[in-house]
Image: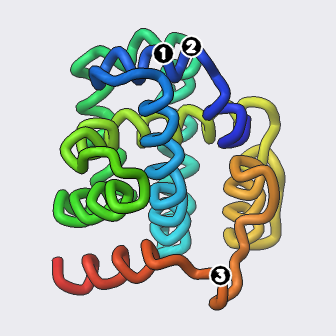
Amino acid sequence: MNLEDLLSNGQVLSELAKSTGVGTGEARTGLEALLPALTRGLERNARSTGGIDGLAGALGSGKHERYLDSPDLLGNSDTRSDGNAILGHILGSKDVSRNVAAHASEGTGLDSALLRKMLPLAASLLMGALSKDSEKGGALRSSPNTSGDLLGGLLGGLLGGSSSRSQANDSPMDDILDLAKKFL
């Protein structure tokens, strides 16, 4: 499953909308705005020492695919708690999460409080999509020579292409993540 599949899944969008009190169009817009920052945070985290092993372990034992198999789980408090734990690993702190939501708000016009509410659910869905990819023989089932190959394959499959970016393609969100991590 890639991000476009996730963003076009009507049942997931409907449940996300219901769980956050918005329409499906706003749910999709919010998810579209949050997922790139989450994937960049996941990539940065996975590239850290032991990060790829932690990601592989989380995908192997977290049963995150349940959020895509049963989108009605998005309304459960356990899903939000799981999502907040995922955010802690991906972004590192609530301040970084707030910055991600504020940046997404600027780009979409959606209220940052709504986007903060949506963030843990988006993180749960992202891990669900990664779990689905690894279940189908995605990057985690291959035997790459380096953890960079593994990460590139995993995130590349999720993004529908390569996860590699040149310095010229770095986004302002990368700067926000870097700055927030320095101060926290």
Q: Which residue is mark 1?
A: 14
* Residue 11, label in figure: 2
Label 2 to label 3, Cα distance in Å? 33 Å
Where in the figure is residue 98, as x and y percent of width and height?
A: 22, 58
Where in the figure is residue 79, as x and y percent of width and height?
A: 32, 25
Label 1 to label 2, Cα distance in Å? 5 Å
Quadrant of the rendered image containing residue 138: top right
Q: Amino acid at mark 1?
A: Ser
Mark 3 and mark 1 lie on one chain; the one further toward the N terminus is 1
Q: Could you tell me if residue 55 is visible in this image? A: yes
Q: Which residue is mark 3?
A: 169
Residue pictured at 29% horizontal, 25% vertical: 20
Left or right, 106 with reference to 145:
left
Tags 2 and 3 touching, CB below 8 Å: no
Number of callouts in the render?
A: 3
Left or right, 140 with reference to 75:
right
Which of 171 and 181 lies nearest the eye of the viewer?
171
Where in the figure is residue 73, as x and y percent of width and height?
A: 39, 14
Quadrant of the rendered image containing residue 175: bottom left
Q: Amino acid at mark 3?
A: Asn
